[in-house]
Amino acid sequence: MPGESKISNNSSLTKFLLLPFSDTLELQLLHFSLFLGIYLAALLGNGLIITAVACDHHLHTPMYFFLLNLSLLDLGSISTTVPKSMANSLWDTRAISYSGCVAQVFLVFFFFGGEYSLLTVMAYDRFVAICRPLHYGTIMDSRACVQMAAAAWASGFLYSVLHTANTFSIPLCQGNTVDQFFCEIPQILKLSCADSYLREVGLLVVSGCLSFGCFIFLVLSYVQIFTAVLRIPSEQGRHKAFSMCLPHLAVVCLFVSTGMFAYLKPPSLSSPALDLVVAALYSVVPPAVNPLIYSMRNKELKEALRKLFQWVQDQHQ
């Protein structure tokens, strides 16, 4: 039967070929150096936030607890895609094993799904802090915070299990070349047999509806937050409220806009070069930029980092 031959072709796949950034050695080394710089910046920035929040008891609050989780998710997401791409450029290869590709798809959706859920939880935290300040301590107690963070990680896990199982259960009969620098579901689907494509489209529609629900929640939360902030009589109070919310809003906009463009852009806009740039924008840039956005206007975080650097200096003297 034809269906059985397609499945046997799929089961015989042992590797995929990823899209190289360039065929020339000089540009491959440039890509390696650029990604190395971004990766080290992400490791340093997120690592400093995790260490500062963990070590400074002044930062043991819901907002910084969620920020620590965000940094962990950012480290995970950038470590899933960038090191493999760097290694491929350095060793002048395109190959990734079948199991490696499955793992990449699973981890990318796990960390990105978890991050989107966590950003929604963080919006709720900001909403309670500004719109329900008298009840903040009871609503956002330590147990509630742990449960919310666990729910964000669990939703990322369920999301990734669904997409990974569904994608790799579809017979792949159009070769093994993935037109992306990591295993991205839309590019893998281009290798699938046409009669199996509708299943994944159905799952994408369902996950799109859930994502849209989170997006509407984010928008409504910030409408109420800014309405409440503008009612604050003192300019200092308004400034403090805005400084709490604007970094989170900037991170949400960066993450959502690049991700939506990558997955919802019309096929007519699709080209290997544009797909490559967009994928780098949503998978590589946010984890590196998020620590900078959060620490830029945050006095408490800056003070915690200053104490951390001071402690390190004292240890070396």
Image: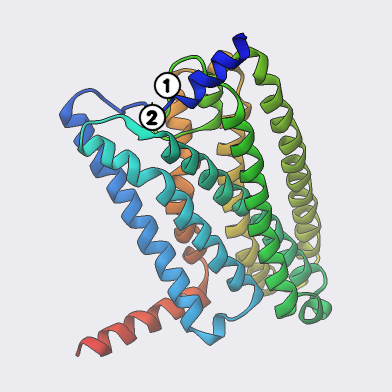
Could you tell me which residue is drawn at 39 percent across and 56 percent down? 42
Residue 185: which disc?
Answer: none
2 or 1: tag closer to the N-terminus: 2
User: Within 10 Å of the Cα at label 1, are there few (<14), some (14-19), or many (20+) other Cα atoms?
Assistant: many
Tell whether 237 sits left or right of 261.
Answer: right
Is residue 4 shown above or below 68? above
Residue for badge 1: 176
Q: Residue furthest front?
A: 1
Rendered residue at 75%/40% (across/down): 212
Which residue in the protein does label 2 denote?
A: 15
Query: What residue is at 16 percent from the left and 31 percent from the top?
Result: 26
User: Between residues 111 and 305, which one lies in front from this camera angle?
Assistant: 111
* Residue 55 drawn above or below residue 246: below
In the image shown, does 240 or 48 lie closer to the viewer? 48
Q: Quadrant of the C terminus?
A: bottom left
The amino acid beneath tag 2 is Lys
Determine whether 261 is above or below 158 in the image: above
State whether residue 60 is above or below residue 107: below
**Labelled pair 2, 1 in contact (Cβ < 8 Å):** yes
Query: Label 2, label 1: how many angstroms apart (C-alpha)?
Result: 7 Å
Q: Is residue 11 left or right of residue 20?
A: right
| Helix, strand or loop for disc 1 | loop
Q: Residue at x 62, y 9 (%)?
A: 1
Between 304 and 155, the one nearer to me in the picture: 155
Question: Which percent across, then down, holds residue 235?
Answer: 68, 70
| Element type at mark 2 | strand
**Mark 1 is on which residue type?**
Asn
> Among all residues in the image, which is located at the extreme left?
26
Q: How many neighbours does mark 2 have within 10 angstroms: few (below 14), some (14-19), or many (20 or more)?
A: some
